[in-house]
Amino acid sequence: MFEWTQNIDWPSMLLSTGQTLYMTIISGIFTFVLGIVLGLVLFLTAKGGLYENKIVYQLIASLVNVFRSIPFIILIILLIPLTVLIIGTMIGASAALPSIIIGAAPFYARLVEIGLREVDKGVIEAAQAMGATRWQIVWKVLLPESLPSITSGMTVTLIALIGNTAMAGVVGAGGLGTIAYNDGFEANNNTITFIATIIILVIVFIIQYAGDIITRRVDKR
C-alpha cells in the first residue's frame, strides 16, 4: 500500500461506495419507470399525438419544466418535509432518494419524449393502416423503435444521478459525497477527496461502457 493512502479509512470508503451505488441503483429504477411514463404522456398527449389533449400536455409539461429548472441542492431543501413524511428522516442514503428521483425523472422524461419523436411517422401510419390499436402502436411500435434512444438517455441520466448523489452527500445523505466533503474537504485531507473522486469516475466509466454496449445491442437499424 502506498504511504499516501495510509491515512484513509478504507472500510468507511467502501461503505460510502456502497451507499453511492445504492442511491444510484434505487433512484435509477424509479427514474426509469417514472421517466418513461411521463415521456409517453408528453408524447401521446402532444399536438398530433395518439391521445392529443392540450390540457394534460400543458400540465405535465409545466411540472416537468419546473422540476428540471430547480437546482438540485435547492430541491433537496424544498423537499425536506416530503422526505421526512415518506422516509421518516432527512439524514441517510434512503432520505436522499425522493429528491434524487423527483429531480431526475423529469429530465429523463424529456429524453424519452425526444426519443419517441425520432420514430419514423411512416412506421406509425403503417401500423394504423393495418388496424393496430393505439396501445398496440405504443407497445409494439413506439417503444421498440425508440429503445436505442431510451437506453442512451438512461445512460446519461444515470451519470447525472451519480453527480446528484455526491451533492446529496454534502447535506448528510452519505456516500462518496459525504466522505469527500466531511473527511476530505473539512478535514483538509485532499487524499480522501482524490480517492473518492477516482471511485466516482470509475463508476461513471462503467455505466457509460455498459450503456454503450446495451444501446448497440438494442439498435436494430
Image (tube, rainbow, N blue to C red):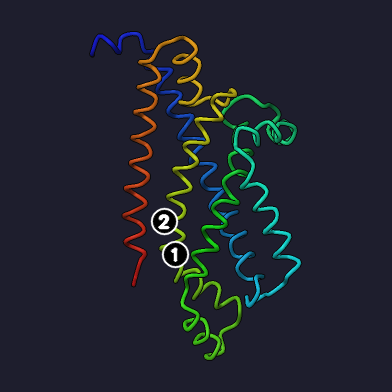
Residue that appears at 43% across and 57% down = 151
82 w.r.t. 49: above or below: above
In the image, 183 versus 87, the foreground residue is 183
**SS for tag 1?**
helix
Q: Quadrant of the N terminus?
A: top left
- In the drawing, what numbered circle is on residue 147? 1
Quadrant hosting residue 41: bottom right
Q: Is residue 201 above or below residue 178?
A: below
- Name the front one of labels 2 and 1: 2
- State the SS at label 2: helix
Q: How far apart in space, not on screen, are marks 2 and 1 (Cα)?
A: 8 Å
Q: Residues within 10 Å of mark 1 (few under 14, many from 20)?
A: some
- Choose between 124 and 14: the one closer to the eye: 124
Question: In the image, residue 39 lies at what x, y percent?
Answer: 59, 61
In the displayed structure, does residue 134 sit left or right of residue 145? right
| Amino acid at the residue labelled 1 | Leu
The quadrant the C terminus occupies is bottom left
Which residue type carries mark 2? Ser
**x, y percentage for residue 120?**
46, 77
Mark 2 is surrounded, within 10 Å at the Cα level, by few (under 14), some (14 to 19) or many (20 or more) other residues, namely many
Query: Would you identify the image quadrant in which residue 84 lies?
Result: top right
Residue drawn at x 36%, y 21% is 194
Which image quarter: residue 62? bottom right
- Residue 152 location (% of width, % of height): 41, 56
Lower position in the chain sequence, tag 2 or tag 1: 1
Residue shown at 51% from the left, 22% from the top = 178
> Which disc, if any, is residue 72?
none
Q: List the residue tagged with mark 2.
A: 152
On screen, 6 above or below 196?
A: above
